[in-house]
Image (tube, rainbow, N blue to C red):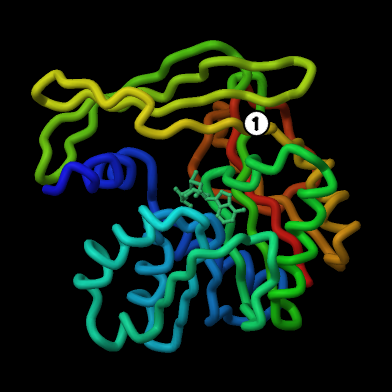
């Protein structure tokens, strides 16, 4: 495996679950709009696994992925595109582009996953992003924002687990919450990997995120012109533990660390 590919192989296996997004986002979209989404735009797409999964999941689904960084886009072309059938490949396209600019093409659903929009630190930029996304949506289109929060995202910690990565072996995955600035609310995070040979890939990925709150994101969506917003919060079992299922909610108990989906409807 080329050395440049390794960090993406590890990231995809340890962090992503594109099949979950491809199964759940259309259900939530149908619930909010009564329509079946066909045209996906994957913002901050990285190696675009959601787009690949999307076009694989139905013959009438198309996908466009946008990312500023040419490296993960090249990885998609080299690694994922060849695994698609010619028909699937014809329905997916990646562009090196800034999500702050609207696309001329219109989409039914725009997905911004893995908290990527937290890269926008200023409210004005956040609203500009939502305006640009809204302008790129077809009528009744939806923007899905994957968010994380809670005290547990703001404490110094290193969380690790072992993951079996096909073609590599057992890898130690480390999520490192390095620093939290109580005044700017900007948090520094990193992902490290330790290979079976014990060699470390330290800081394979680094993030500097402002942890936006759900309420302020909903307000910014409204300000950008979205006519409605919904929050999909994780459903708890009778003991209060997460079930991996999400449902629209307007109130929720504070969780130490949570993941939720905020959706704006055009
Ligand atoms: C955390 S990664 C997300 C990868 C993938 N979406 C996922 O779910 O794992 C964030 C990506 O956002 C891209 N990015 C950051 N700012 C951007 C912008 N303004 N427009 C497009 N892509 C951007 C970075 O290049 C990086 O690949």
166 horizontally vs 35: left or right: left
Q: Nearer the viewer, residue 28 or 159?
A: 159
Q: Quadrant of residue 213?
A: top right
Left or right: residue 219 versus residue 143 is right
CB of mark 1 near ligand 1 (< 8 Å): no
Q: Position of residue 20 (x, y in %)?
A: 43, 56
At 69% across and 60% down in the image, what residue appears?
A: 100
- For label 1, the residue is 149
Q: Is residue 128 above or below residue 243?
A: below
- Residue 13, percent across and down? 28, 44
Q: Residue furthest top?
A: 156
> On the picture, is 142 further left or further right than 126?
left
Is 227 in front, or is 36? 227
Looking at the image, which residue is at 47% across and 31% down?
A: 206
Q: Secondary structure at mark 1?
A: strand
Which picture quadrant has residue 26?
A: bottom right
Query: Between 70 and 51, which is closer to the camera in this rendering?
Result: 70
Question: Camera-side residue: 105 or 147?
Answer: 105
């Amino acid at each position: 495996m080329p050395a440049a590919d390794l960090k993406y192989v590890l990231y995809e296996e340890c962090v992503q679950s594109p099949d979950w997004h491809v199964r759940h986002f259309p259900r939530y979209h149908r619930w909010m709009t009564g329509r079946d989404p066909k045209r996906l735009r994957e913002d901050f797409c990285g190696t675009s696994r959601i787009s690949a999964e999307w076009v694989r999941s139905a013959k009438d689904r198309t996908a466009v992925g946008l990312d500023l960084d040419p490296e993960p886009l090249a990885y998609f072309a080299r690694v994922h595109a060849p695994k698609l059938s010619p028909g699937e490949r014809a329905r997916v396209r990646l562009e090196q582009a800034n999500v702050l600019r609207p696309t001329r093409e219109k989409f039914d659903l725009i997905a911004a996953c893995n908290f990527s929009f937290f890269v926008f630190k200023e409210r004005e930029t956040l609203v500009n992003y939502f305006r640009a996304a809204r302008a790129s949506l077809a009528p009744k289109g939806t923007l899905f924002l994957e968010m994380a929060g809670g005290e547990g995202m703001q404490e110094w910690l290193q969380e690790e687990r072992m993951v079996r990565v096909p073609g590599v072996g057992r890898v130690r995955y480390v999520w490192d919450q390095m620093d939290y600035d109580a005044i700017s609310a900007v948090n520094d995070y990193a992902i490290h990997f330790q290979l079976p040979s014990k060699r470390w890939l330290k800081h394979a990925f680094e993030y500097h995120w402002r942890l936006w709150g759900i309420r302020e994101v909903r307000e910014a969506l409204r300000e950008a012109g979205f006519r409605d917003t919904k929050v999909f919060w994780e459903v708890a079992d009778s003991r209060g533990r997460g079930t991996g299922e999400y449902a629209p909610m307007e109130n929720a108990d504070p969780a130490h660390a949570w993941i939720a989906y905020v959706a704006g409807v055009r």
